[in-house]
């Protein structure tokens, strides 16, 4: 017998002792890879295998998209029931699982190539519909290219099915997430993710500014704020390390379309374009663009321009939340409108002022300046301007004063990850949801028919 222990994790103090023979592990593996066993059995088999590998509850929730309370209950009962736990589902398939199971059965017993079922039968993943014919093409590509990485597969899917961003670039990040969901359901089988041990992190180990004595700066010493888009490896490494070392979240990976900035100040810049903001400060900004991508021509020189005396902080913007009740109610859009226009909403996912920098109203001044700069930079990179910003403020640590001072609007409080049960949601710190309209007609733009 082979004994494995599923250890303590932050979601609870219970320890799950799981004992499986090699034969039992083999059978569980067959169910986990099956395309006919049903989603309920497939995911629970994957939970057991993940637990045997030492995956904690949080990781398993992301691996199989099953609520944590369900995972804990299943792991608690598995030692007593063994493989019998996988015999019969304790519920009917959900509305999301039904079309997935129909797709799996159809592809195992395919109709004649000329059948209309190949185009009628569809599965839905993250705002996209995929027909049986398209799924078959993806499977064929993976089978005929066994050495392809997940990234290469995502690129091929983008080009094969015309999945492009509005700026003409491939939707690699979004499609990668879709393929991962398909892999969870065994619609396709992706190659394993390379071990982190084999990844090159040398670029992350660049020096970052060390903590120093507090630098107190009067408003008159920071009349100009300079927003430098992160484009070079050196700036990218600096941005990552500052977030890792000084931001309370620590994680520096952003998802989807994104912009990152380093914020400098302390000098007037001969080549900066300055105009007064609402508080009378000179903010490094961009003139109203004309032509297709005028900002791109100008923006490419940002990294070469002299920078301010002081590095003040960093900002990060990325793809918005897929579904957010308070935000969606504030906008007033339908589900179809949300799917069609969600790219016009951008999330301020990171905001950090270096801990040794002190200056009156600096946070709100930075927020005020970046809301004027970001739309032009976003248009230069992606071919369109966002019309609404969103952000989350952890109420257990912050009050969001600087956002409110910069005229952001609080529209609600998060209710916890949708997969979490009621009890687990109570344990998670609440986050205020704040929005900032970038134009007066943002609702009209967001509620345009698809």
Image (cartoon, rainbow, N blue to C red):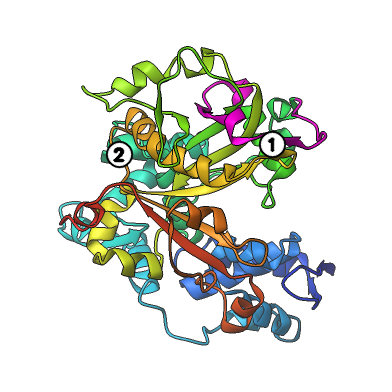
Residue located at (31% from left, 34% from top): 159
The magenta span reads 207-235
Residue located at (59% from left, 28% from top): 264
Q: Which residue is mark 2?
A: 385
Report x, y in % for residue 63.
58, 60
First reached walking from the N terminus: tag 1 or tag 2: 1
> Foreground residue, 191 or 72?
72
Does 80 sit above or below residue 196? below
Left or right, 436 with respect to 293, comes to: right
Q: Which residue is mark 1?
A: 242
Q: Quadrant of the N terminus?
A: bottom right
Residue 76, located in which quarter of the rendered image? Answer: bottom right
> Foreground residue, 27 or 374?
374
Does 88 sit above or below residue 106? below
Residue 175, located in which quarter of the rendered image? Answer: top left
Left or right, 143 with respect to 82, comes to: left
> Foreground residue, 13 or 23?
13
Report x, y in % for residue 16.
79, 76
Q: Is residue 256 visible?
A: yes
């Amino acid at each position: 017998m082979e004994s494995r222990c599923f250890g303590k994790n932050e979601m609870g103090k219970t320890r799950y002792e799981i004992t499986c023979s090699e034969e039992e592990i083999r059978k569980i593996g067959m169910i986990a890879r099956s395309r006919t066993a049903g989603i309920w059995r497939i995911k629970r088999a994957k939970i057991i295998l993940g637990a045997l590998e030492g995956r904690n509850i949080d990781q398993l929730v992301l691996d199989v998209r099953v609520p944590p309370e369900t995972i804990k209950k299943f792991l608690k009962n598995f030692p007593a029931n063994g493989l019998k736990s996988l015999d019969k589902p304790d519920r009917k398939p959900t509305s999301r699982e039904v079309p997935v199971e129909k797709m799996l059965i159809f592809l195992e017993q395919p109709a004649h190539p000329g059948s209309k079922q190949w185009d009628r039968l569809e599965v839905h993943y993250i705002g996209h519909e995929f027909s049986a014919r398209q799924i078959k093409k993806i499977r064929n590509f993976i089978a005929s290219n066994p050495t392809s990485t997940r990234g290469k597969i995502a690129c091929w899917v983008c080009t094969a099915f015309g999945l492009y961003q509005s700026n003409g670039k491939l939707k690699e990040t979004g499609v990668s997430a879709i393929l991962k969901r398909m892999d969870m359901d065994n619609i396709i089988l992706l190659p394993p993710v390379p071990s982190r041990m084999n990844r090159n992190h040398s670029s992350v180990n660049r020096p970052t500014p060390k903590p120093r004595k507090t630098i107190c700066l009067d408003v008159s010493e920071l009349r100009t704020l300079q927003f430098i888009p992160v484009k070079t490896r050196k700036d990218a490494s600096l941005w990552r390390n500052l977030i890792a070392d000084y931001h309370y979240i620590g994680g520096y990976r952003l998802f989807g379309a994104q912009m990152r900035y380093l914020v400098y100040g302390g000098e007037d810049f001969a080549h900066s374009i300055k105009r007064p903001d609402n508080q009378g400060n000179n903010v490094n900004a961009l003139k109203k663009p004309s032509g297709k991508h005028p900002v791109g021509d100008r923006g490419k020189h940002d990294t070469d321009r002299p920078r301010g005396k002081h590095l003040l902080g960093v900002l990060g913007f990325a793809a918005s939340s897929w579904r957010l009740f308070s935000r969606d109610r504030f906008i007033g859009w339908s589900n179809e409108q949300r799917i069609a226009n969600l790219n016009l909403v951008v999330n301020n996912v990171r905001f950090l002022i270096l801990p040794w920098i002190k200056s009156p109203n600096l946070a709100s001044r930075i927020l005020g300046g970046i809301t004027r700069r970001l739309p032009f930079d976003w248009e230069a990179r992606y071919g369109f301007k966002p019309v609404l910003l969103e952000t989350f403020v952890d109420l257990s640590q912050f009050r969001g004063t600087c956002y409110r001072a910069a005229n952001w609007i609080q529209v609600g409080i998060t209710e916890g990850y949708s997969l979490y049960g009621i009890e687990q949601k109570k344990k998670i710190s609440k986050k205020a949801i704040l929005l900032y309209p970038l134009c007066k007609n943002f609702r009209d733009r967001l509620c345009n028919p698809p």
